[in-house]
Amino acid sequence: MMQEYLGAKALSARTSPYGRLYVYVIRGVMPGAGYAFRHKMLAAWEEDGVTELIFEEPYMEHVLNYLNLYHPRAEFLWEGRIDYDNWEAGRPIVPTHAAGFLVCQSWNRLEPAPCEESIILDPGLSFGTGLHPTTQDCLGLLRRAFEISPQEIVLDIGCGSGILSIAALKLGASFSTAVDYSLLAVNASKINAELNGLSGRIGIVHGDALRNTHHPAGLMLCNINFSIVEELLKEPGFSSREWILFSGVNPRRQHTVFMDILLRSNREIVEVRNRSVWYSYLTRKA
């Protein structure tokens, strides 16, 4: 079980871009660390006996002093440094055009073209900047789904930054339930719902994907890990949904396996998209 803690710097939308991230990794569970560093850090989490603290400036001396004073049995492992641009897609996080959407950052807003819908994001440390191949293909398949069969209610499993829920509402849905097990993602989704003026139309749930498939929806969005999708498709109530958009399958050998799973789950494959070794699928009940 992972425990997450948000720092004060992660609680509101950014007006300036993120820079270099400093990650401090410690072997040992440190109750109170999230509170002790809450004003300086972006976030912290504990999983499998390892704690990670993330800051935007070097904080090594303070972390080591804290360990010596309060958790002398904990073992400092290493300091990692990563540019925020490399956090998700490995390239600069800038406004991008995808499937008739202009995805902008809260610190770099542009005016969309007349034929575009604008999505404003502060993705924080969650998945969903709009630059990853799976996100861009999901946006395209989402638009395709609404062209074929407009939906009122959407369920977004593994919502990350909330980008797909926001896109679905921009395409005409009236409400989306957005689910993620990560507190970082839930926080980002709340911020982004507010940035796009959609707070009242997105219900955000902090919970496990496998325990949150019961929410009513005509269209389900699943841009998540392949292993979780496999588990979801074993549930009769899940696989019988009218429309489901899947993404996160990589590489081709997984694609071949997944195509077979979809057919055995009595799902019709409406369209498959492939970009940079990633596969995405728009499906409906056969």
Image: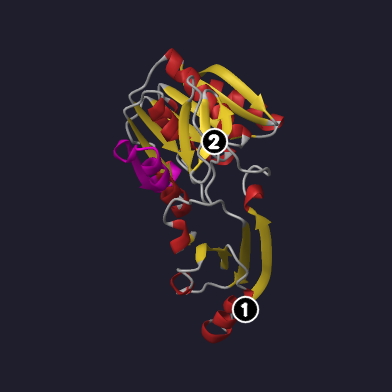
Q: Amino acid at mark 1?
A: Glu
Nearest the camera: 169 or 9? 9
177 falls in the magenta region:
no
Q: Looking at the image, which residue is at 52% across and 37% down?
A: 104
Residue that badge 2 annotates: 230
Horizontal and vertical percent position of residue 100: 52, 23
Q: Looking at the image, which residue is at 49% across and 19% down?
A: 115
Badge 2: residue crowd in 10 Å (few <14, some 14–19, many ≥20): few
Nearest the camera: 73 or 100? 100
Span shown in magenta: 190-209
Is the residue 227 above or below the residue 14 in the image? above
Mark with earlier residue (1, 2): 1
Horizontal and vertical percent position of residue 207: 40, 48
195 falls in the magenta region:
yes
Outermost residue to the front: 111
Horizontal and vertical percent position of residue 33: 49, 73
Q: Amino acid at mark 2?
A: Glu
Could you tell me which secondary element the residue under label 1 belongs to? helix
Asked whether, in this view, residue 112 is left or right of residue 274, the answer is left
Residue that badge 1 annotates: 61
Residue 235 shows in the view: no
Between circles 1 and 2, the one closer to the viewer is: 1
Q: Quadrant of residue 22?
A: bottom right
Asked whether, in this view, residue 13 is left or right of residue 54, the answer is left
Badge 1: residue crowd in 10 Å (few <14, some 14–19, many ≥20): few
Asked whether, in this view, residue 238 is left or right of residue 60, the answer is left
Q: Quadrant of residue 162?
A: top left
Is the residue 76 above or below the residue 112 in the image? below
